[in-house]
Amino acid sequence: MGFVRFSEIADAKFDERDYLKTGIERLDKAIVGLGLGHLVIITGPRAGGKTTLIGQLANNFIDRGYSGLLASFEMANPRLKNWLLLQALGPENLRGFTTSNGKELFYPRTPEVKQAAEAWIDRKLKIYDNVSFGRTDVSKAIGAEIKANPELKFVILDNLMKIEFDGRADSKWEEQSQIVKGLQKYAQDHHICMILVAHPNKVKTLPRIEDVGGSGDIINTADTVLMVHRITNDFKKRAWEMFRWSEDNPAFQYSNIIEVAKDREFGADDTMVGVYFDPRSKRFLNYQEELIRYGWDTQPVQERVGFSRIEDLSPDDPF
């Protein structure tokens, strides 16, 4: 401990392999990817697209050969499985039907494509079984998996506000602060990407980074903060109030915007990335006709059937 000479400090080295590509082209161009050793916060208003983004990140990371963990405290695991499967399959591998009230539901086109996509996800991703939302139980489960498989590269937690506290701090904000700081340190120590969903407080203006709920340490500790917005009339009204965006702003051609609210590494703060949402496959698309083919899908395009529409903590634990 103490001070060292400036010349004794190791040089910073950039290695693009230390960044997990999101598959969202303009986002990857702005921030290179989500860094190993980093804590990434994903936030945004209700129904803005946070679940869509984390599911697509998981599929994109798997497609690039990375293994990881996903714990959803928002969504029951059967529903989470269906969401991830729809994203993995894409619209060309789905069939659907319309309910009596006109709601369209979508399913795998055949048992064979379902099995192929399931096996592809199974090889790289494990899902938390949701038997407990308690801080200690979740932390121990993550620590055990990473100890057993040091090749894991990412952990996704959705969301901070649903983790149940164990009374080891004087207040909810202090406990949240401890969790976030623990996750950031764990990401650094194990060279993995920690992705944490955190909801903003309810505000009557366009949510900003300072509105993320809980302790201010959440945002201060994060390396990257992504805010996901859905383009609605309410968003347009708030964007006018905040940015003076007029009705003909090019951003409004998209269905969603991913805002880089904080980027400690490259300083790409305030970058706005527009994406298109496909309601069938729950995917974000770079452009409206984009065809994403993940690694499980080896069938030649020309042979496909088209989509038919009918709709006590251990040192091994992170926190």
Image: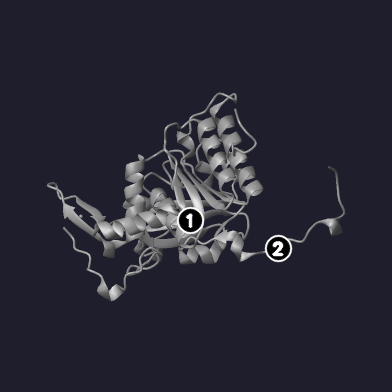
Question: Furthest residue to the bottom?
Answer: 302
The residue at which mark 1 appears reads as 259
Would you say 133 lies left or right of 298 here?
A: right
Q: Answer yes or no: is residue 282 visible.
A: no
- The 10 Å Cα crowd at callout 1, few under 14, some 14 to 19, many 20 or more, is many
Q: Nearer the viewer, residue 225 or 74?
A: 74
> How many tags in the picture?
2
Secondary element at image label 2 = loop
Q: Nearer the viewer, residue 20 or 218?
A: 20
Q: Is residue 216 toward the left or the right of residue 253 in the image?
A: right
Quarter assignment of residue 311: bottom left
Q: Earlier in the sequence, mark 2 or mark 1?
A: 2
Of badges 2 and 1, nearer the viewer stands 2
Q: Amino acid at mark 1?
A: Glu
* Residue located 53% across and 67% down the image: 29
Q: Nearer the viewer, residue 61 or 204?
A: 61
Answer whether residue 316 is visible to the viewer in this image.
yes
Q: Position of residue 78 (x, y in %)?
A: 32, 43
- Residue 205 sits in quarter: top left
On the image, numbered disc 2 is attached to which residue? 13
- Direction from residue 99 to residue 23 in the image, left or right: right
Name the secondary structure under disc 1. strand
Residue shown at 37% from the left, 67% from the top:
293
Q: Amino acid at mark 2?
A: Lys
**Residue 57 point in image, percent of width and height:** 45, 55
Q: Quadrant of the C terminus?
A: top right
Instruction: Report x, y in % for residue 36.
Output: 60, 54
Question: Residue farthest to the left?
Answer: 100
Other residues around mark 2 within 10 Å, as few (<14) / some (14–19) / many (≥20): few
Which quadrant: the N terminus?
A: top right
Residue at point 47% right, 66% down? 25
Residue 157 - label: none
